Image (cartoon, rainbow, N blue to C red):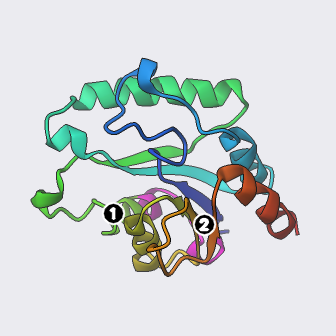
Amino acid sequence: MKKKALFLDRDGIINVDYGYVYRVEDFKFIDGIFDFIKLFLDNGFLLFIVTNQSGIGREYYSRDDFLSLTEWMLKEFKKENISIEDVFYCPHSPDEKCECRKPQIGMITQAIKEYDIDLNSSFMVGDKQSDIEFAINADISNSIYIGSNTSIKNYTYSFKSIIEAKNYLKVIIDG
């Protein structure tokens, strides 16, 4: 049976986006992110991170730097009894025109190959137009925009914060 999934952007959704975050000392979890994720986890969603990491392609940091931070982040999630199924990332700079950089759907294609996902029951959470376009391009039925940029469009839901999103979606997700 296909499973519903929660796809999360990283910078700006899981952690504060200070720009090209790749060191543990620069990583700060967004207030409320653990409770938000647990809402979906408790309701049978698989959890995935889908993140553009052009800092690798731009040589601001290495793939090993990214993977070390990711390993640390996943351990922090484990401490909160949150298990992330997988982390998909695009290491390319925007000018490389790859198929994996959001809003292209390479990361979703990879996830679908490895996991039996029902995109109609799934959610994508992001803070940029490319995240919302990614959801649309991949046929993920529900997109959640977190932020206050009024030029972002075509999302299913919009909230100013993760805490606000959790409080609203609790009724919908819990049924």
Is 29 included in the stretch rendered in magenta?
Answer: no
Residue occupied by mark 1: 102
Q: Residue at x 47, y 72 (%)?
A: 135
- Left/right placement of residue 81 relative to residue 72 reads right
The numbered mark, 1 or 2, whose residue comes first in the sequence reads: 1
Q: Is residue 93 visible?
A: yes
Count of numbered badges drawn on the protein:
2
Label 1 packing within 10 angstroms: few (<14), some (14-19), many (20+) = many
Instruction: Look at the image and tell me in which quarter the C terminus lies.
Output: bottom right
Label 2 packing within 10 angstroms: few (<14), some (14-19), many (20+) = many
Residue furthest out toward the left: 95
Observer-nearest of 82 and 59:
59
Three-letter amino acid code at disc 1?
Answer: Lys
SS for tag 1?
loop
- Provide residue 16's location: percent of width, then percent of height: 50, 38
- Provide residue 110's location: percent of width, then percent of height: 38, 59
Residue occupied by mark 2: 123
Observer-nearest of 43 and 129:
129
